[in-house]
Image: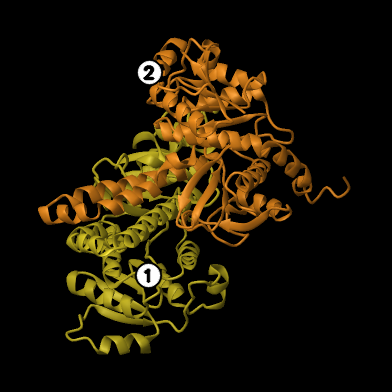
Chain colours: A yellow, B orange
Amino acid sequence: MRIAVDAMGGDHAPQAIVEGAILAAREYPKIEVILVGDKFRISALLNHVEKLPKSISIQHASEVIEMGESPLLGLRKKKDSSIAVAVQLVKEGRADAVVSAGNTGAVVTATKLKLRFLEGIERPAIGTVFRHNKGVSLLLDAGANIDCIPRHLFEFAIMGSDYAKEILGYPKPRVGLLSIGEEASKGNELTKEVFSMLEKTNLNFIGNVEGRDLLTGAADVIICDGFVGNVVLKVGESVAVYFKELMKKEFTSNPIRKLGALLLTGAFRSIARKADYAEYGGAPLIGVRGTCIICHGRSNPKAIKNAIRVASEVVSHHVNQHIVESIKANGHALARPPKSVS
Amino acid sequence: MRIAVDAMGGDHAPQAIVEGAILAAREYPKIEVILVGDKFRISALLNHVEKLPKSISIQHASEVIEMGESPLLGLRKKKDSSIAVAVQLVKEGRADAVVSAGNTGAVVTATKLKLRFLEGIERPAIGTVFRHNKGVSLLLDAGANIDCIPRHLFEFAIMGSDYAKEILGYPKPRVGLLSIGEEASKGNELTKEVFSMLEKTNLNFIGNVEGRDLLTGAADVIICDGFVGNVVLKVGESVAVYFKELMKKEFTSNPIRKLGALLLTGAFRSIARKADYAEYGGAPLIGVRGTCIICHGRSNPKAIKNAIRVASEVVSHHVNQHIVESIKANGHALARPPKSVS
């Protein structure tokens, strides 16, 4: 199993990425990590390491697409960027998967352009795994597809279900459609049509779920278009940050409160652990011919290590093959009722 | 100033509603409150009250539309429901505004059907006032209009701006369009078209805001379609509830933590106060010929009192008249570029 890791992408690259790669190589002996990027800078970091795992190698790439750069222009101008080279390794069969904490748009674009899509998939989607009080759920699309037609959300449901089955360990993932009421009649034009499609699939479709169900574990897979997904994830994050800041201010406003907060140190740590994105190892771009895990720009070594593990699991569990089969098995759900004989 | 209050709507009706009406009548001597509903039940509650303000009266309505009932069927079947009668009072000029914590769909439907819309408004919207660390902001539409065309969001922006100016006290409300990136080019087809419309208005349009800006006070008025608005508000609430439950569990898991939490009692109270929906007195349905404030089903007397105050302010500040003028003043923004001569 060979994972190409973009060593230059992310707020703390290459340091955090290289450290994460070393953690992964040590913990998962079957994984070979190919660090893609400036060989001089990467070597300098690796040279300090005692007992460097032999399963780590370097693939030189002379350029870097910066975080704020236009994905398409960046890829066009910088043919030798770490992102482009890492994806190229997958394309040429020299790596099984790619992991990057770099410019998300550039990672998505490079992967979609170079690897193309799985049979039956028109729109690859970004999945986001998040924790709630009963475990974890997967939301997709998290922002790769802004304007969607019903077929796209149908694809997200299939892809999400197979991913959740193989990677999150749900034998029969409950797939919910994010909408504004539980009844089939509640929703916008898009979700109402998707609802009637998903009813015809062999998925464990549980119907609509609402914004308030997001953190109650009502569904294992939550489907929405990329506009709604992006807004929802950012709102969720912002509410969490808001309460954190409010508490910080209130809990330090006088000595008695400070003492109270001190006694709760362990509780705060436990809560922070439960909200730690690093646990889930990045967001998969699902639906491309290959495996691509996108990490948060601020990824720390642990997040990178987990992303490398997840990438290897996606490959070894043949998630893509399952998706192609599921799309085929559910093609009838896409047929429009008026067309009677097919 | 006469406010018709649906005494029968809400989880704690009629008790909480009647108590809220009494609070309002005592605090705001210029407001006459007309309690609409079962006169026997309302009288029974009022009879207990010492020094009952003379500004409270009862308008009998023999029926109640229940919370789970279909709005349209409910209104058709129950002509003498408290909601229908309360709105009718406004229609007949016997009340200046209506306040209800009952079935939201029925309140919206009754108001839209009976009062009709303001000149130039195709889609009345529900506004929601929420608190963040720099004050309060207004989000609309919160769920009245699920599938929207650009013109509708243009209307929401005008209505929201005038409401925020008159009721929230922002001299020049910053209007933001909820989208998935700051640049004009970021968004879905709907928001991109709305962006170019709002640029042409005389509003203080500050461009796109993201989900993460919701609680940072980046905009005083946040515009989105009712599907996104509904999902966003419910997600926000669910994240807050999730953290509250997580903390409760962690803070009581051993005696030391319990002591810590005890020392923070004041801080928790202060945080709860900052998240108290009752402060903001309900959600206005903006764009109808009349004034309608919709309250949370679980409204307590304080929430009802504040809603009555807000309703009276909407009337006395002539918010509707301002909206009609603003729509007229900004009609040019709706013109499509290809049509040259008008």
Amino acid marked by disc 2: His
Tell me where residue A82 sits by quadrant.
bottom left
Chain at numbered mark 1: A
Q: Does the rendering let one see residue A325?
A: no
The residue most toward the front is B51
User: Disc 1 residue type?
Assistant: Arg
The alpha-carbon separation of the residues under discs 1 and 2 comes to 62 Å
Q: Position of residue A94 (x, y in %)?
A: 35, 72
Task: Describe residue B99's horizontal placement relative to residue A172 as left or right.
Answer: right
Q: Does residue B295 sit above or below B214 in this rendering?
A: above
Q: Is residue B131 above or below residue B39?
A: below
- Name which quarter of the figure residue A23 lies in: bottom left
Residue nearest the observer in this picture, B195 or A157: B195
Q: Nearer the viewer, residue A267 or B58?
A: B58
The disc placed on residue B48 is: 2
Would you name the residue on which mark 1 appears? A298
In the rendered image, which quarter is residue A307 located in?
A: bottom left
